[in-house]
Image (tube, helix red, strand yellow):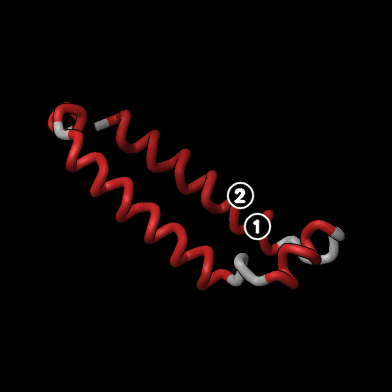
């Protein structure tokens, strides 16, 4: 599956675009894009941004592990 993806640049671009849109949508739904949330994160009052980014990193790590094992 992955060897077919490496040879098709258009498919890579489309997949990257779709994943980027999905990630941005989830950031928006999580409330990370609000000014007050970002300011409170910088002032160490609200850790919503950290929680969402750590969740995204762990999900990415699991996804890469699953894809490598295929």
Residue drawn at 53 percent across, 63 percent down: 27
x then y, percent, for residue 28: 52, 69
Residue 42 placement, left or right of 18: right
Residue drawn at 24 percent across, 48 percent down: 14
- Element at label 1: helix
Q: Quadrant of residue 41?
A: bottom right
x then y, percent, for residue 4: 13, 31
x then y, percent, for residue 64: 39, 36
From what the image shows, is residue 63 above or below residue 46?
above
Residue drawn at 44 percent across, 57 percent down: 23
Q: Are marks 1 and 2 in contact (CB under 8 Å)?
A: yes
**Label 2 CA crowd tier, 10 Å (few <14, some 14–19, many 20+):** few
The front one of 12 and 57 is 12
Q: Which image quadrant: the N terminus?
A: top left
- Element at label 2: helix
Residue 52 placement, left or right of 21: right
Q: Quadrant of residue 37?
A: bottom right
The front one of 27 and 64 is 27
Q: Report which residue position mark 1 lands on.
A: 51
**Label 1 CA crowd tier, 10 Å (few <14, some 14–19, many 20+):** few
Which label was assigned to residue 40? none
Residue drawn at 26 percent across, 43 percent down: 13
Q: Report which residue position mark 2 lands on.
A: 54
x then y, percent, for residue 15: 26, 47
From what the image shows, is residue 54 above or below residue 2?
below
From what the image shows, is residue 63 above or below residue 22?
above
């Amino acid at each position: 599956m992955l060897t077919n993806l490496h040879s098709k640049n258009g498919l890579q671009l489309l997949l990257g675009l779709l994943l980027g849109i999905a990630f941005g949508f989830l950031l928006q739904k999580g409330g990370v894009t609000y000014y007050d949330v970002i300011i409170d994160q910088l002032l160490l009052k609200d850790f919503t941004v950290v929680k969402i980014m750590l969740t995204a990193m762990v999900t990415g790590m699991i996804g890469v592990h699953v894809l490598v094992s295929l």
